[in-house]
Image: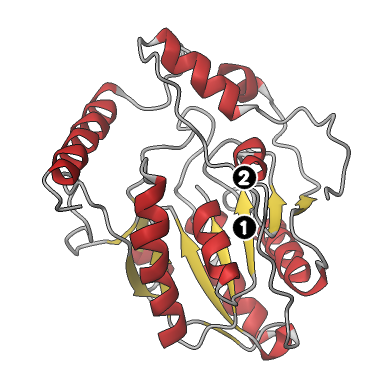
Amino acid sequence: MSLVARYLEAHGIPTVVFGCARDIVEHAGVPRFVFCDFPLGNPCGRPFDAAMQRHVVGLGLDLLAGATAPRTTLVAPYAWGDDTWKEKCFTPERPFLDEAATARWLERKQAYRDLKSTGSA
Amino acid sequence: MASDDMASDHVRYIDKTRDYYRSEGYDKPYRWAHFDDVPFTPLGTPLSQCRVGLVTTSEMAVRGVAQPVPDDDPLRNPYWLASDTPIADLYSLKVAYDRYATTLDDVDSYLPLTRLAEAAAEGRIAARAPRFQVAFSQYSQRKTLGVDAPMILDWLREDRVDVAVLTAV
């Protein structure tokens, strides 16, 4: 997503990225970023909390208008509560993808490599 | 420039994924995209006069309709759906999220179609774009930059979008 934001911005469209993986987005470098310190999946606020989502999305709209330089990160002022997920994500106890999804991912990756090797991608 | 200090206790996914996949037997770590320079386009028009586009990695689909990109399609090119699709008819096919900690059952928590419609109704933005775009999280950065991003730019230009909101799921 960061790469797409950078591309759009370079072609004249101001962007704001909403995300939960701060290190990945900031490592790539984007113009404007609203960081929501939540588990991967809900970058615009807690599920079924319309008021929080309204606030978080509003912060991004403000950032579109207010940012004066690239790499502007704004941290949404919310905590998930129970932070167990921070320790447990990407561990053998909580593998990110289940076995079937991992298998599909590897198959697609190989198929893409095959296409590339024949010049079709 | 960040609005808070860097002592934040956010998850270091780059480190975590490297360690995790190494432990799973993948010894070649993924090289996350990194750039020294970041493009910047100042907003040239008041936001209240802007048409806002929406791009997401949340792999949306419409209930009762064939999924836009089959699971076995290795190219996984971006696609678009109508922004006025009833929110109750939309769902996410994304499997790469923290399924132990949260859900993707509330579309607006990652694809803020309702929130943008509200912003338009309030006059905070001029309008929500008529379509939103889905980009897959590709492992090939060359593919994202060379194929996917240009396709999305074309669609946003067709829709006369002034600014874009991107949500990374």
Q: Nearer the viewer, residue B72 or B37?
A: B37
Rendered position, A117 above or below A60: above
Point out residue A41 in the picture as x, y percentages from the top left corner: 52, 43
Residue beneath disc 1:
A17
Q: Residue at x 28, y 59 (%)?
A: B77
Q: Residue at x 51, y 54 (%)?
A: A3
User: Image quarter for residue A10?
Assistant: bottom right
Horizontal arrangement in the rendering, residue B112 relative to residue B88 (left or right): right
Viewer can see residue A94: yes
Q: Secondary structure at mark 1?
A: strand
Q: Chain of mark 1?
A: A
Q: How is the image coloured?
A: secondary structure
Question: Do circles 2 and 1 both sit on a common chain?
Answer: yes
The circle on residue A64 is: none
Q: Nearer the viewer, residue B166 or B30?
A: B30
Residue beneath disc 2:
A25
Q: Residue at x 20, y 46 (%)?
A: B74
Point out residue B69 in the picture as x, y percentages from the top left corner: 22, 56
Rendered position, A105 above or below A73: above
Rendered position, B62 above or below B37: below
Viewer can see residue B84: no
Q: Secondary structure at mark 2?
A: helix
Q: Amino acid at mark 2?
A: Val
Point out residue A13 in the picture as x, y percentages from the top left corner: 59, 76
State if disc 1 and disc 2 touch (CB < 8 Å).
Answer: yes
Q: Chain of mark 2?
A: A
Neighbour class for label 1 at 10 Å: few (<14), some, many (≥20)? Answer: many
